[in-house]
Amino acid sequence: MSARRLDGTAVAAAIRSELAADVAELTRRLGRPPSLSIVLVGDDPASKVYVRNKEKAGAEAGLAVTVHRLPATAALDDVLSLVRALNVDDRCDGILVQSPLPPAMGKQASEQVFDAIAPAKDVDGFHAENVGRLVQGRPLLPPCTPTGVIALLEREGVRIAGTHAVVIGRSDIVGKPMAMMLLQRDATVTICHSKTKDLAAVVRTGDIVVSAIGRPGYVTPEMIKPGAVVVDVGTTPVEDRGIVVRLFGPESPRVASFDRRGSTVVGDVHPAVAEVASALSPVPGGVGPLTITMLLRNTLEAARARLAPAGR
Ligand code: GUN
């Protein structure tokens, strides 16, 4: 069996074309394009790439995207002051502070910064109030990656209700909200993590498996129930050719691509899982394009709510 590919690129393109009408309507009503402010602190290479992709996608969708860059030496107070200024800036609809923040800012820095963002502008959905609302099943701005996974499953016709969904990983950004969103769609949900006993056996009971741990090729075919639907949320940049050869085979197009670029992004799911699963969302081309699409959608929601706050 070879799994059906859950095509995140196609689903994201369809949703983005649906959003175009919302962008036009909001631009007319606001008298300006809906706007997204991105705060990037320091020089983390992966963060720079993520921010560039968000900026590009926003501009292509017709949003006004402003990137505020602060040096790695900035103080936590500098970030908090910028966020507070954006909170009260009428021309700013959505705020996103790219994580991770520089380690020198301290362990709790991200939490403090996320909680400083006005919940109504928190397009990442990371503010404690938005997390609480998600848990209660009345989200305002839901986190982008798990929302993207749900959109992919629903648009590709995957039934969630009544299934056993296994989420691997318990991060605040993906694992925990993912589990909550699957539960709200009537799945029975298990969250696995580094201390789970016999993780492989637990994962093998999943009708839907979502992996978000950032370990290339960790989920192998023996861990998957035949016919399960597998969603790969892991995205680990790999610069070791040996890993790419081991996972994809020496003659694979992936190794050829690695040889051209010197690196590649690899998911948590071993490619051989495609022989066992009924459907598989790959890396790249799976959840990634949907995450950014959900960010665009959240920005439009935030802008719409600012026009009609009573409607919330
Ligand atoms: N770093 C990695 N993923 C994310 C994300 O979704 N949002 C933000 N703000 N930072 C991230």
Image (cartoon, helix red, strand yellow):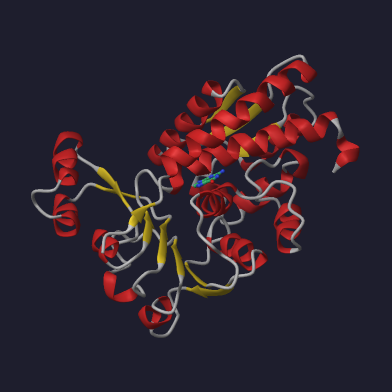
Is 252 placed above or below 89 here?
Answer: below
Count all numbered tags in the image, as a single digit. Answer: 0
Q: Name the residue at 19% across, 58% down.
A: 247
Question: Viewed as shown, does residue 10 lie left or right of 187?
Answer: left
Question: Viewed as shown, does residue 54 lie left or right of 97?
Answer: left
* Of the pair 182 and 45, the residue shown nearer to us: 182
Residue at the far bottom: name it: 197
Give the percent coordinates (x, y) of residue 256: 13, 40
Give the percent coordinates (x, y) of residue 137: 74, 60
Q: Looking at the rendering, which quadrant does residue 199 occupy? A: bottom left
Q: Name the residue at 70% across, 50% down.
A: 127
Residue at the far right: name it: 310
| Image quarter hosting the C terminus | top right
Q: Looking at the rendering, which quadrant does residue 117 occupy? A: top right
Is 105 placed above or below 18 here?
Answer: below
Q: Name the residue at 36% across, 79% down.
A: 200
Give the percent coordinates (x, y) of residue 129: 76, 54
Give the percent coordinates (x, y) of residue 234: 39, 55
Is 270 placed above or below 299 here?
Answer: below
| Image quarter hosting the N terminus | bottom left
Q: Looking at the rendering, which quadrant does residue 232 occupy? A: bottom left
Q: Is residue 211 visible?
A: yes
Q: Is residue 72 visible?
A: no
Is 136 placed above or below 289 here?
Answer: below
* Of the pair 32 and 215, the residue shown nearer to us: 32
